[in-house]
Image (tube, rainbow, N blue to C red):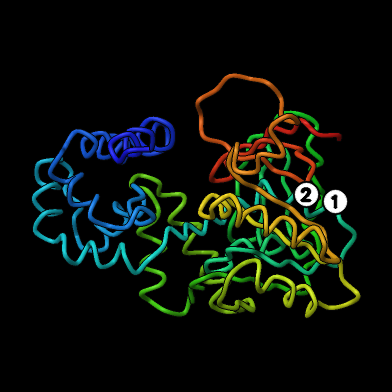
Amino acid sequence: MDLRRRFLDFAHREARGNSPCYEQRAADIADDDTVLALIGQLPTGKQQPNLILAAARVHGATAETYGEFREQLLARWPAIAATAASRRTQTNEAGRSATLLPVFARFPGPLSLIEAGASAGLCLFPDRLSYRYGDVLVDPVDGPAPVRLSCEVSGPAPIPTRPPEVVHRAGVDLNPLDMADARDREWLEALVWPGQHDRIARLRAVAAIAAADPPHLVTGDLTDRIGELVAAAPSDSTVVVFHSAVLTYLPLPARQKFVTTVRELPCHWVSQEGVGILPEFADRLPRDETTAARMVVAVDGEPVAYAGPHGQFLDWFGPA
């Protein structure tokens, strides 16, 4: 895909309906040969629209009009390019816990949660949050949490009465983030799209939970290190390896290697990835026409639901 098309797809398929600012900004960049040429000098993996726009925000390129934004971008491009080269789109969206919770709660507790591509590990605390599924409220055993996630539900989703008990939290990432580090927090906040005030609020709230009780995060390749994390989990717990919007950043052979590895481990496997990221699911998904961005939730390799990229909806098509 050429760079112009990449920014147009981001504008029309991802930002539309989620961030009017980013929708317009990405469309404007797609029509700006000078800016595209600058971005095109970066390695292909560093040309992601969300990465470029987040790096621009870190360095103060935040003007409302495109003309002013463009001036800021060009003037600060060396710093913006350096940040894009050194950082990753580690959008640690705690809202995805809302679409993962019904799956986690199906397993017998207590649980050991192990996240592949954990970023700061903000999805490792589903038991510390409250939820609203339509008219149904789900709170931790000790009462409502400071953070309540809202998720619209369709289909026979198995909404639990309580979050599951989690006794162990671990994860692996190429570059784990530390919520006690101000620069890491700044980067995660920059990855939240303009206008999404609720996402910023919940990011800060869950980041405070992670800073106070850090999960065990290791640095390395997902496939190389996932086995040791599974082996280190408490033997009297149900081990669940999960990932959300992570495999899209791996080439297909690496995805297939990870899937083969995790299937052979003594654990359950929960995936939440974009449609088409795991080709083996293609013939097992409901046939409907939409251009909206969504992910496929699967349990032990069996697709059960579509989910909103930020946990905003859960469309359950699997068994109740």
Q: Three-letter amino acid code at disc 1? A: Arg
Q: Is residue 203 visible?
A: yes
The tally of labels here is: 2
| 108 left or right, relative to 14 | right
| 49 left or right, relative to 107 | left
Give 6 or 101, whichever is nearer the viewer: 6
* Residue 316 location (% of width, % of height): 74, 33
Tags 2 and 1 in contact by the CB under 8 Å rule? yes
Give 242 or 165, whichever is nearer the viewer: 242
* Residue 111 location (% of width, % of height): 81, 66
Q: Secondary structure at mark 1?
A: loop
Classify mark 1: residues with Cα within 10 Å, few (<14), some (14-19) or many (20+): few
- Which residue is denoted by mark 2 in the rendering? 103
Q: Is residue 135 visible?
A: no
Quadrant of the frame with the N terminus: top left
- Which residue is denoted by mark 1 in the rendering? 106
The answer for how far apart the CA atoms under marks 2 and 1 are is 5 Å
Rendered residue at 74%/53% (across/down): 270
